Amino acid sequence: MTGADGFVGRHLVRHLLRSGDEVAAGCRPGGPAVEWGRGAPMGGAGVEVTPLEITDDASIAAALARAPEAIVHLAAVASVRVARQDPGAAWEVNAAGTARLVAGAARLREAGRSDPVVLVVSSGEVYGAGPAALRLETDPLLPISPYAASKVGAEAAALESWRRTGLRVIVARPFTHTGAGQSAQFVLPAFVERLRAARASGAATVPTGNLTPVRDLLDVRDVVTAYRALLERGTAGEVYNVSRGEGVSLAEAFARLAALIGARAVPVADPALARSNDIPHLVGDSTKLRRATGWAPTMSLEQTLRGLVDAEAD
């Protein structure tokens, strides 16, 4: 697994361990130590920590030397804001890094050492702006951010390798998801952080970006079960939306979080927090995933938001 020390990666490692899998956890050298679960140290039972730099061919080759049965590719510049600040770096990690990884996996296959399933994690952001309707995997890809454009590049690199070499590539397009451990550079944990501060200080307002966009909000715990389901039952060369299929405005999400936290502060637009060219409506249709794997989200939005608030309180 690349990006095993990231937000989703940590949750997926725990899920795989509970499922009885053995995990080679690819982590950037020099990064902070990670606990995969309560009291389970980095490199605990079932986890082999593997230094991995996705922009370095030699590092990728060393990580793949163990000839894995499956590869989950999570490593990425995952923030739209960070990618906008340095588009070249986003392309180097997201697109070129994916190309390097699938090339290494294809060499394993060609050498007869392993025939891994490779799950490449993209993003629902690749659809860009469009009508207020559920997005389908067959919809055109119209990215409107360097982050989303680099993810389109990653998909293209992965699927080209599948067509040319037969490498068993599957692409997942997750929509917005959150949960314990997500950085406050993402919108919902940022809301929680600011609302808690407002309650503590008695502030009457909380600065926010644009709250009109509608998003498909998933729990990270449901997302990682979808990834494992795709490893087992997904079809090579196919793309699958990972989504709840229900739209919630950021204004509603803010209000629900404020109620859970007990903060009475009201949101006030701060231009410094607004995203330019924000997608007004981004909600996915996951019928294809559900039919292929039997997956369905199990966590309600209320459970997801409450879990996020409780995690931040800890």
Image (cartoon, rainbow, N blue to C red):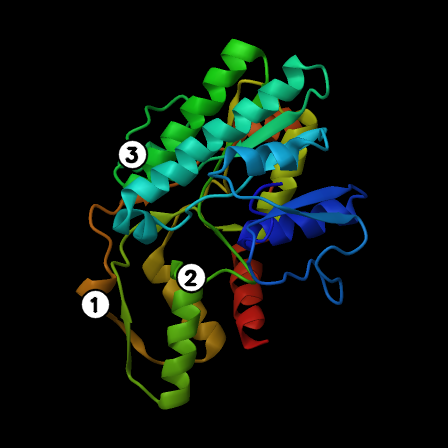
Task: Tell me which residue sits at (72%, 45%) in the image.
Answer: 16
Is the residue 49 above or below the residue 116 in the image? below
| N-terminal-most mark, 3 or 2 | 3
Which label is found at residue 188? 2
| N-terminal-most mark, 1 or 2 | 2
Residue named by callout 1: 270
Rendered-image quadrant of the N terminus: top right
Seen in the image, is 46 located left or right of residue 6?
Answer: right
Residue 170 position by quadrant: top right
Q: Position of residue 293 (x, y in %)?
A: 65, 29
Circle 2 packing at 10 Å, graded few (<14), some (14-19), many (20+), is many
Cα–Cα gap, marks 1 and 2: 16 Å
Q: Position of residue 124 (x, y in %)?
A: 41, 37
Identity, as a three-letter code, of the amino acid under mark 2: Leu
Task: Tell me which residue sits at (37%, 74%) in the image.
Answer: 194
Q: Position of residue 85 (x, y in %)?
A: 26, 51
Task: Tell me which residue sits at (63%, 52%) in the image.
Answer: 11
Circle 3 packing at 10 Å, graded few (<14), some (14-19), many (20+), is some
Q: Nearer the viewer, residue 230 or 106?
A: 106
| N-terminal-most mark, 1 or 3 | 3
Which label is found at residue 143? 3
Is the residue 126 above or below the residue 33 in the image? above
Dots 1, 2 in contact, CB < 8 A: no
Identity, as a three-letter code, of the amino acid under mark 3: Pro
Cα–Cα gap, marks 1 and 3: 25 Å
Identity, as a three-letter code, of the amino acid under mark 1: Asp
Q: Residue furthest left?
A: 271
